[in-house]
Image (cartoon, rainbow, N blue to C red):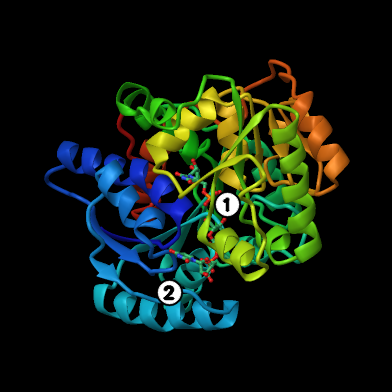
Amino acid sequence: MKIVNIVGARPQFIKLAPVLKAIQRYNEEHKDLPIHEVLVHTGQHYDYKMSQMFFDELGLKSPDYYLGVGSGTHAYQTGEMLKRIEKVLLKEKPDVVMVYGDTNSTLAGALAAAKLHILVAHVEAGLRSFNKKMPEEINRVLTDHVSTLLFCPTKTAVENLRCEGFTNILNDGELIPYPPDSNLLIQFPTVINTGDVMYNSLLIYGELAEKHCNILQKLKLEPKGYALVIVHRIENTDNKERLQSILQALHRVAQEGLLVVFPVHPRTRKVIQDLSIDLSSFGFKLIEPVSYLDMLVLEKNARVILTDSGGVQKEAFFFRVPCVTLREETKWVETVEAGWNRLVGYDPEKIVKAAMEARPGVESAWPYGDGRTAVWIVNLVRSLVYREVYFTD
Ligand code: UD1
Ligand code: UDP
């Protein structure tokens, strides 16, 4: 059996890591019938600190194909990816293409495969923010509707798909029991609650991060003595008033005595430069994007996290660090319901108040599975492709 994994942007390298480990483990246990894995990197992210740094740190294999698409408008970027991915798929003829999350690389991979009648497996299926102005929402909806295997991180994601007409829902959307019933009736497309793959990544790399990272010492940070900021969502960066409003609010947080640590995404850095915004007097610790392990340490030790990143909202919840989300809605609704995440949009008063008064949420049912997501996904792909059920511990 052959799988082509398609990635291209920072969060996808982090989601890919546990899946590659699970494939490796599967192959060690099934030497007679291994999975042949081919890795495609679209080149959507290309700076060292947005791409190669993650391959080096997480010990990922080098991509078998680097497509070098780079930046551009949505149509340009997605179109170039489609053309180049199609060539790879025609050559490799895989049984399954696996795509991750909701970036342009996700949509291009799914569409190119579906048009060639190759099974598409979507990791992080079913998430919705119900805001079609977000490019990611369009990518999510379209990817799900050309996918055959929809691996959902939460029950909410399953219910979103049920509302959109998906009817083949394994175990009625509850986390599949382990080991699963060997009489599963599989009909495509299939929706499966596998738990969250980023939680799986955290369990694999969290301890390593704590042991080996000295980012707090390097940046002279005290545990719980700073606010961590990650802002790069297009709706915030490409709207001058919004960005200025957020930056002014963060300035006020710094003036109130809470150090603001801000690893700046290249999109955000470019807009700040283009608008000639001078942050030198804002009292921020502005740094380059950090590695995943450093990020985990920074998140765990923050007093509060202010962000518009999807993955970072969820990691704040994993670490039980209060999160202030600089957006009007989120696809990670469980974090809000449990009181660990507050949606404040870009109103400076709300941002400052939420940051300075950040409080723990409540202990609630754990929505993200048991952290064995990647092993389940790999075994499910294998089983579903061959229409058999074949699970290992
Ligand atoms: C993309 C995803 C977004 C995800 C984010 C993760 C889409 C539509 N958006 O947004 O869902 O949250 O990645 O970080 O796919 N740039 C560089 N160097 C790089 C990469 C980008 O300088 O290595 C700059 C370029 O100016 C580029 C801009 O950042 O135009 C935006 O990059 P792009 O990949 O188009 O979108 P992101 O904002 O990164
Ligand atoms: N991340 C990182 N370094 C950074 C910022 C983020 O390693 O400087 C990690 C973060 O821990 C999370 C993932 O990148 O695992 C989230 O990706 P991003 O914010 O780029 O995208 P999103 O989740 O918003 O799609």
The picture quadrant where one finds residue 192 is top right
In the displayed structure, 343 sits above or below 34; it is above
Quarter of the picture containing the C terminus is top left
Q: Amino acid at mark 2?
A: Gly
Spot the residue most to the front.
281
Which image quarter is the N terminus in?
bottom left
Q: For the residue carrying disc 1, how many other residues have a C-alpha within 10 Å: few (<14), some (14-19), or many (20+)?
A: many
Task: Return the x and y of residue 251 as percentages of the image width and height.
Answer: 72, 42
In front of the other: label 2 or label 1? 2
- Horizontal relation, residue 389 to residue 238: left or right: left
In the rendered image, the vertical position of residue 213 relative to residue 3, given as above or below: above
> Label 1: which residue?
125
Q: Out of 392 and 9, give the one closest to the viewer.
A: 9
Tag 2's secondary structure?
A: loop
- Residue at 22% x, 53% y: name it: 61
Report which quarter residue 88 is drawn in. bottom left
**Of 221 and 137, which appears nearest the observer?**
221
Residue density around tag 2, few if under 14, some if 14–19, many if 20 or more, within 10 Å = some
Q: Which residue is mark 2?
A: 70
- Counting every numbered tag in the picture gives 2
Determine whether the beta carbon of the residue marked 2 sits less than 8 angstroms from the nearest atom of ligand 1: yes
Q: Position of residue 103 (x, y in %)?
A: 54, 62
* Residue 172 percent location from the top left of the image: 64, 37
Q: Is mark 1 within 8 Å of ligand 2?
A: no
Residue located at (50% from left, 25% from top): 221
